[in-house]
Image (cartoon, rainbow, N blue to C red):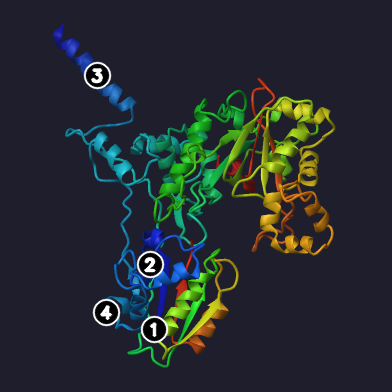
Amino acid sequence: MKIVARWLVSAFVIASTVWAGIVTAADGKITVMNPRGIMPAIKQIPMAERPDSLDGKTIYIVDTKFANTKPFVDALRDNLAAAYPKTNWIGVDKVGGYIQDDPNLWAEIKAKGHGAIVLLGH
Amino acid sequence: MGVPAVAMVTSAFDELATSTAFKKGMPGLRVTFTPHPITGRTTEESNVYLKGKDPITGKPMLEEVVNGLRDKLAKQDKQAGEIEREERPRFLTADTADNLQQMFHDKMWTDGLPVILPTEEKVKAMLKGTSHAPDEVVGEMRPSGPHEAWKYTVEMVAVNAVMAGAKPEYLPVILAIAATGQTSLVSSTSSFARMAVINGPIRDEIQMNSSIGALGPFNQANSAIGRAWTLVSKNLGGSGTPGSTYLGSTGNPLNYGNMTFPEAEESLPEGWEPLHVQKGFKKDESVVSIFSGWSFNTIAWFSPLPQQDVIKNWLTHFFSFGTGSATIIVDPIVAVELNNNGFKTKQQFAEYLMEKSANPGWLYWSTHQEEYKKAKEGVEPFASYLKLGETAEVPVSRYVRRAPPPGAPAGMPPRNPVEVLAVGGGTNTYWSGGDFSYVSGASIDKWR
C-alpha cells in the first residue's frame, strides 16, 4: 500500500512539473531559450590621422541646431579663437533637424577643412 | 568625414554617446562632455562652462577638444574590420528557475515583473499559433531613427510571447505588431507612448475585451499582447535600456500595457466605419493599427453643451508635447450621441474638430513669433486676433493635415491629424482624448 502511495505521489509531482512546462534536470536546473534578437555586425571605421599642430589649420564647428543652444555654440567658437588664434575656426549650421544627415557639408569639410567639432543637444 | 573630428555632447548623454560611437564603428571617437543642460544657457553661462572642466573626464574642456583633434591616435583607433559583439546562443546556460528569473531581470529582458520562463516546450507550443516557419525573419526594429536595427525570427517573437504570458492563438497579433518594426519604447527624452488597436474577426476569436474596462487590466488577451510588445521592443528591437537606448526623462506609464485594445466595432453607429476600414483594409480582415503619442485625458462632463462642443473645447485647450495630432476614443454611447447630433461618419466628426477647434492665446502667440510681430504692426488677421487679448482663444486650429513623411510611398494621402475610435461598455458617456497619431497598420491574417 505504501509503495503504491509513494508511486502515486511521484507520478503526481512529475506530471505537475511537465504540465508546468518546466522539465527539471536532476540538479534542479532548467534550460530556456534566448529572448534576444540578432544584432547587426559592426565594421570598425579607422579614425583620421591627426596633425601635429592645429596652427594654420581650418576647423569647422558644426552646429546640429538643437533648440536654444546657439549662445553656447557661438561661445565655443569665440573661446577657441581667443585661446588658439593661429587656427581658423569656422562656425557652420548643419541642414535640417539634429538627426538629419548633411553629406554636402561633410564633403565641404573634407575638401576645405582639417577637422571638425560637431555639437550639441539639450 | 575623413578628417579629425570631436563630438561635444552634454553630460546626461555620456552612455548614449559612447555606445552610439561603438555601434557606428568608431569606439575610440573623441567626445568632450559639457554640463547638462546647455539649452537656454546665456553667453555668460556658456563662457563659464567652457573655461571649466568636462564633468565626465575632469579635463579642461577647451584643451580636451583641441587635444582630440591633434593628439596621436592609439593603435586600436586606426584598425578596420569587424568588431566582436556579444554572442547569441539559441539556448541560455541551464540554471534554476529562480536564478534565471533574476538573470532576466538583471539583464533588463523583462518589464520589471516576473515572466514565464521560455522553455523549448513552451516556445514549441506557442509556435502552433502560426503556420510560419520558426526561422522566418519577421522584420527589424530600432529604438529610434539614429539607432541600429535588430532583426528577429518567428521563433524569437514566440519566445517573448511566452514570457509575456500570451496564448498561442495570440501569436499572429504579436507577430503582426513585430512586423510593423515599430518599437513601443521609442528612445526620446520626451517619453513617448504607443498604442495598438485591433480590428476584425480576431478580436472575438481570442476573446479580447472591447467593452467595460477595455483600456484597463481586465482581459488576458489585451494585457498579454500589450506586454508582449514591450518585451519584443526590448529584446528584439534593441530598445529600453535607460541611458543608452531609452532616454525618456520621466518615462511613461502607458508603456506598461501600450494601450492595446480592440475597437468596439459592433457598437459603432450606422455609417461609422471601423478604423481598419477607414485605413483601406476590408472589414473581414484582422488588422493591428499602431499609434504614437504621449498622453491621454479621460473625461465625462455633463453640461447643456452638446458632446461635440465639449470635445471641441477640450481639444482647443489640450496641451502636451504633441500639439498637432489628436485621437479621440469615445464610448459607443457617445458615438451614438454624436451620430444623432448629425455626424454621420467618424471622418465628419474629425473634420468638425479640425475646423472648429482653436488655439489658446498663450500657446499660439508663444509659438508664432512672426505672426505676433505682424499683429503688433497691425497686419490682419493677426491684429484682430491680438485685439481679443493675448490669452484669448485664437481661431486657428492646431490640427491641420500634414504632408506625408519624407520617403513615404507615392500617392500616400496627407496624414489625418484627428482620429476617432470607439471602445467601452456604455456605462457612462465617457471619452478619452490625447495627442496620439496613426503610424501604420498591418495584417494579422498574414501571420496566422
**Which numbered circle lies on residue A83?**
1
**Label ID, residue B33:** 2
Dot 4 falls on which chain? B
Q: Distance between the residues labelled 3 and 4?
A: 64 Å
What's the mark number on residue B26? none
Label 2 sits on what residue type?
Phe
The x, y position of residue B283, in whole percent, is: 71, 37
Q: Nearer the viewer, residue B139 or B239?
A: B239
Q: In this view, does A36 lie to the left or right of B186?
A: left
Q: Is mark 1 on a helix, strand or loop?
A: helix
Foreground label between 1 and 3 = 1
Answer yes or no: are tags 3 and 4 on the same subunit. no
Q: Is residue A75 above or below residue B422?
A: below
Report helix, strand or loop for mark 3: helix
Residue B50 x, y percent position in the rendering: 40, 72
List x then y, in percent, for residue B81.
Answer: 34, 74
**The C terminus of chain B is located in which quarter?**
top right
Tell whether B61 sits left or right of B128: left
Residue A11 has which mark?
A: 3
Residue pushed farthest bottom?
A56
Per the rendering, the mark at residue B75 is 4
Q: What residue type is labelled 4?
A: Lys
Work out whether residue A64 can be spotted: no
